[in-house]
Amino acid sequence: MNVDYIIVGLGLAGLAFSKELEANNKSFAVFENNSQNSSVVAGGVYNPVILKRFTPVWEASNQLNVALPFYQELENKFKKRYNFPIDIFRIFKSIEEQNNWFVASDNQALSNYMVSEINHSAIDGIQANHGYGKLVNTGWVDTQLLLNDYSAYLKTKNALLNESFNHADVIISDENIKYQHITATKIVFCEGFGMLQNPFFNYLPMQEAKGELLIIHAPNLKVNALIKAAVFVLPLGNDLYKVGATFNWKDKTQNPSEEGKIELLEKLDTFLNVPYKVVKQLAGIRPTVKDRRPLVGTHPHYKNLAILNGLGTRGVIIAPIAAKQLYNYLENGVSINPEYSILRFLKD
């Protein structure tokens, strides 16, 4: 088999790069062994405001300008809905947070998202003694549905290989790359925290952050906005809500834990005052980088080996623009934004 590209991994990074290749009439084969599930269990929320400090998310405006049309194109392609615009209600813990909200909402970079007024309207089922702030032009992406549909689509094109990728079988030359029965011009690794087992890129700094989520059934909670307090509560429809998320830097397993469940429930109970039932628990490992920037670029010695990784908690908005930057670099020689590029870790 001869292809232009081999892609290793089909999370949001692999999907975004595959879509970029297809848009440019490049052939490719994707390897996916379903060993990583950070994209599938992600909250999928896009929001350009850091809700802990009310400061702008890095590059969020540029990222959203690419990401929102990206998901619209996929919705048009598959005749499905993946992007769900939804307001966010940030519950305040104190008068000080109210004041901080007022100040932040005057920031020009945030004024399109933060409604300056403090809202004291009651929300049935939610305790908000100090009121809440409202964010608009935000939403969430159903990453699990999208990845399931995209995987099925690639299967129809015979472009998806559901098997593990063996790095030891890669044979690199100046002209091409051979991997078992496939010859390609380049390989792009989108392996999530599996990068730590990749001999070509495991020198890059990555921290595995385990995240856990709950799905609860709360028929008396009638909200149509995402509620953010000690944890977020995201309405999914049919009285189901996604609750998350934890950050665990020590547990490297992908299995749901009792510890994670207890942490989420304790935080949820600080502001939710209606009955609910836990119907599902999810867990995954986020591929994060200390500076919270992605890992995009090529190997220092093998220019036909590339990486697209480290998307962290904001993969839904970072993946499309990062994939576009990598493609334009590999095919057109356009420099990668230094804040995205792995070259920042190769400086003296």
Image (spheres, rainbow, N blue to C red):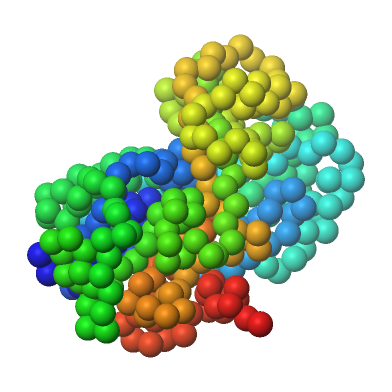
Query: Where is residue 187, by image quadrant?
Result: bottom left
Please state the horizontal and vertical placement of residue 263, each as a whole percent of the image.
68, 26
User: Could you tell me if residue 196 is visible in this image?
Assistant: yes
Please give left or right for residue 78 compared with residue 12 in the image.
left
Please state the horizontal and vertical placement of residue 22, each as a whole percent of the image.
22, 67
Determine whether 180 is above or below 98 in the image: below
The residue drawn where x is 46% and y is 85% is: 335
Determine whether 277 is above or below 312 in the image: above
Please state the horizontal and vertical placement of residue 96, each as a whole percent of the image.
89, 45
Choose between 255 and 141: the one closer to the eye.
255
The residue drawn where x is 30% and y is 54% is: 166
Q: Quadrant of the N terminus?
A: bottom left
The residue drawn where x is 87% and y is 38% is: 94
Choose between 94 and 136: the one closer to the eye.
94
The residue drawn where x is 30% and y is 44% is: 33
Please give left or right for residue 214 compared with residue 113 in the image.
left
Choose between 152 and 104: the one closer to the eye.
152
Single out the residue that lies furthest toward the right: 96
Determine whether 248 is above or below 321 in the image: above
User: Could you tell me if residue 242 is visible in this image?
Assistant: no
Q: Across the whole image, how many numbered discs are drawn on residues?
A: 0
Please state the horizontal and vertical placement of residue 207, each as a whole percent of the image.
60, 52
Q: Quadrant of the C terminus?
A: bottom right
Query: Where is residue 328, by image quadrant?
Result: bottom left
Single out the residue that lies furthest toward the front: 168
